[in-house]
Image (cartoon, rainbow, N blue to C red):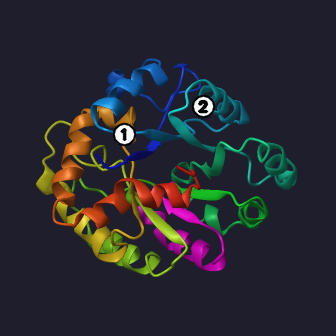
């Protein structure tokens, strides 16, 4: 059996105030999700490990994930949070660089103004990442892709990865402007794309694999199997599909590619991008 890495999932101890983004429509994920909940799913679906990504914006969350990783060796990497806008960002990055499990950082840009990634204070933080060889996860809605294109072109030596294929509106079937911007951002060779979070951008209750296919076609036409990785987005994905259903949907789509290409998607690209050293 070939190796697999889940390059995008979350852990949290549910806090109704801090986690207010989990609204009444999301009852399925209004509880704790910890390593002991994920491990059986990884084993069942032939994954050897995962990358844990921040779920709320605080250094406390970063430390929480580092602590979980120290106790669970299947957590192979952490994408944490640090305030990239702070003038002390280099000091904080130096502090976190002592934890080799931390591979990179992200900010919840989807909750910010559309021009957030153009701000000088944010870009100062992005510029500071390279000295520590940290990656950056781009979490945006599709309308924010033009600013992301500007960002990745401004920092050609920074390693970027797009979370959740930049969240197109799969539920409504809108694709044209997203497709145009994906074609553009994929030209930047320092950018990888996570095939993750798609089921929750579709209709949670009635999506079908055919709903995802046009978007997957765009991603693989532009990023190919050389610059794509798998991410479950568990447990958020539970809102629309089981872990196994997410995996099986991608397995079926990837069956058109040869074994070497599939291995890049499921394992090699994530291992290389996040320097998991597996």
- In the rendered view, would you say 69 is above or below 128? above
- Crowd band around label 1 with a 10 angstrom C-alpha radius: few (<14), some (14–19), many (20+): many
Going by the image, does 143 lie left or right of 116? left
Bounds of the magenta span?
139-162
Label 1: element kind? loop
Q: Is residue 240 visible?
A: no
Pick the residue in front: 161 or 142: 161
Write the residue at 71% across / 30% down: 60
Q: Answer whether residue 264 is magenta in the image.
A: no
User: Residue 109: which disc?
Assistant: none
Q: Which residue is mark 1?
A: 47
Q: Position of residue 135 (x, y in %)?
A: 62, 58
Write the residue at 23% across / 69% down: 217
- In the rendered view, would you say 277 is above or below 150? above
Q: Which residue is mark 2?
A: 69
Instruction: Tell me the quadrant of the picture where the N terminus can be found.
Output: top left
């Amino acid at each position: 059996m070939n190796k697999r890495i889940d390059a995008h999932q979350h852990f949290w101890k549910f806090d109704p105030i801090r986690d207010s983004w989990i609204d009444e429509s999301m009852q399925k994920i209004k509880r704790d999700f910890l390593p002991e909940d994920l491990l059986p799913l990884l084993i069942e679906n032939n994954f050897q490990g995962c990358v844990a990504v921040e779920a709320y914006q605080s250094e406390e969350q970063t430390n929480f994930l580092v602590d979980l990783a120290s106790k669970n060796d299947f957590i192979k990497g952490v994408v944490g949070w640090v305030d990239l806008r702070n003038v002390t960002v280099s000091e904080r990055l130096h502090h976190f660089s002592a934890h080799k499990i931390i591979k990179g950082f992200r900010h919840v840009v989807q909750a910010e103004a559309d021009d957030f990634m153009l701000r000088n204070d944010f870009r100062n933080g992005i510029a500071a990442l390279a000295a520590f060889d940290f990656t950056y996860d781009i979490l945006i809605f599709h309308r924010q892709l033009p600013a992301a294109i500007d960002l990745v072109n401004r920092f050609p030596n920074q390693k970027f990865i797009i979370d959740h294929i930049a969240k197109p509106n799969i539920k409504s079937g809108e694709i044209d402007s997203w497709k145009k911007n994906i074609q553009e951002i994929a030209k930047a060779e320092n950018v990888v794309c996570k095939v993750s979070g798609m089921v929750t951008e579709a209709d949670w209750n009635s999506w079908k694999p055919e709903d995802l296919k046009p978007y997957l076609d765009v991603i693989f036409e532009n990023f190919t199997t050389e610059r794509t990785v798998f991410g479950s987005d568990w447990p958020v994905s539970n809102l629309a599909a089981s872990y196994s259903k997410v995996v099986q949907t991608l397995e079926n789509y990837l069956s058109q590619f040869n074994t070497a290409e599939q291995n890049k998607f499921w394992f090699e690209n994530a291992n290389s991008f996040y320097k998991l050293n597996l």
